[in-house]
Amino acid sequence: MSGLYQIPGLLITVLCHAVVIYHMAEHRYSKKKFVLYSCIYIFGFVSMGGYGYAVKGMTGVFAYMGIVVGLFLYSCIVSKDGFPQKCFLFITYFCLFTILDNMLKLMVKLFLPQISEVAGYYVAIVLRSMVVLLAAVLYKKYVAVILRSLTDSGKRWWNLALVALLFYLLQAAVSVLNARNVIPDAYLLLAFAAISFLMCVVYGVVFSNISYMKKDAEATLVRQNAEYLSNRLSVLQRAEEANRRLRHDMRHHMDAIAEYAKTGDTSAILAYIGEYSTEISEATVKRYSENRTINSILSAYADKAGEGGISFSVRCNVPKELKIREIDLIALFGNLLENALHGCQESGKEKTCIEIHIRMKNSVLIIVCNNTCSDKLKLSGSLPAGKSIGISSILSVCQKYDGNLDYKIENNVCSACVVLNL
């Protein structure tokens, strides 16, 4: 088959690669830069693929290896995921792509023997592209959220990458047998189908377990936060009642001061006023927000920060009612502030602080939390490396409200920005 016939097929294939990588990876660059890198990759892919078809033999094999390496480098360049995660996603995708490629070529050969070689080539490519794009849609809808919940420490991702690599080597071995015509085509097709089925089962079990453990851990964390905040809310309510009682008793206090004044006992008046001021100060509840849930959370963590000698400041401008579930507010603010407290405590700095900025812009809730952090804290993409279950819980809330979470570190200050569309 002349190399000219393969060029459109190569173009379809590489465009399919670019679309899948775009939806599979967490983007490092803007769309314009992604398109630029994609154009460079597409040109290199088509050139090398065309050359491989033209020369064939061992030189063609090296051209194929160059295509694989180029695809891996392209996926690494445009993605800001951690390297172990990039390896897992690439190996999984390439394994799926190769299995589909071999299966569809065998199916065309077995079930459509009457069509020409050129027609068979394009039928296999079009069907393969459709299946791969469908898999990318399913991944984006059902699997991406689960994978984003994993920590970027590396160990778990490397384990997943090893599983993907084992499946790739298994199908590669079958592909070699296919190339050497050692096994009949029908048996080869069954072998590829079995590998695909086994891969789906293993991945399904792995992802189901990850999803279950993630939800269980998040539910436990939310329950803990809710219990703490419920206790704190009771304390605040008692303080408010004490404050109302003091205001109610104001007339009696004025009468007592008047009696001291009649006798000219100035020192007794001053002592009484001092004692009364202290009692009022202790009973006063600082109000950070009109929203009761947010106010309770901020008050609770203000006390925690005060106990640890951490400066705590808030700027909040949100309405009394928000279109967000109370349990989501607790999960979001509780984990955000808990992480900020831990960041201050682990920073080793003499002066530490937490600054919270909360505001509504149209129907968008914007939360920025700045806190002192350790010099060792690093980011992996837009999230802290080795992100905790607390950050995963925040991400879960962000995804529920079509929002996003971004972290930045500058001058030993960690800044978390949460945006929710309410």
Image: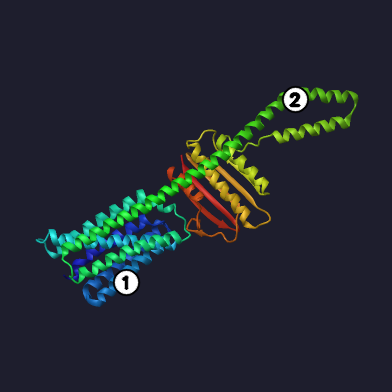
Residue 7's quadrant in the figure?
Answer: bottom left
Rounded to the nearest angstrom, the CA distance separating label 1 from label 2 is 85 Å
Element assignment for label 2: helix
**Image position, residue 100 (x, y; %):** 24, 60
Secondary structure beneath dot 1 equals helix
Counting residues from the start of the chain, the first of labels 1 and 2 encountered is 1
User: What quarter of the picture does the N terminus occupy?
Assistant: bottom left
Q: Which residue is mark 1?
A: 66
Residue 327 point in image, percent of width and height: 50, 38
Q: Is residue 129 left or right of residue 281?
A: left
Q: Is residue 284 above or below residue 340?
A: above
Q: Is residue 81 visible?
A: no
Q: Amino acid at mark 2?
A: Met
Where is residue 104 drawn, in percent x and y? Answer: 20, 60
The image position of residue 188, as x and y in percent, is 20, 63
Q: Which residue is drawn at the image coordinates 24% and 66% (left, top)?
A: 174
The residue positioned 32% from the left and 71% from the top of the image is: 66
Instruction: Find residue 250 and name its label.
Output: 2
- Label 1 crowding class (10 Å Cα cut-off): few <14, some 14-19, many 20+? some
Q: Disc 1 residue type?
A: Gly
Mark 2, residues whose alpha carbon is within 10 Å: few (<14), some, or many (≥20)?
few
| Residue nearest the viewer, comparing 192 with 118 | 192
In the image, is 202 to the left or to the right of 104? right
> Looking at the image, which is closer to me, 87 or 70?
87
Left or right, 173 with reference to 27: left
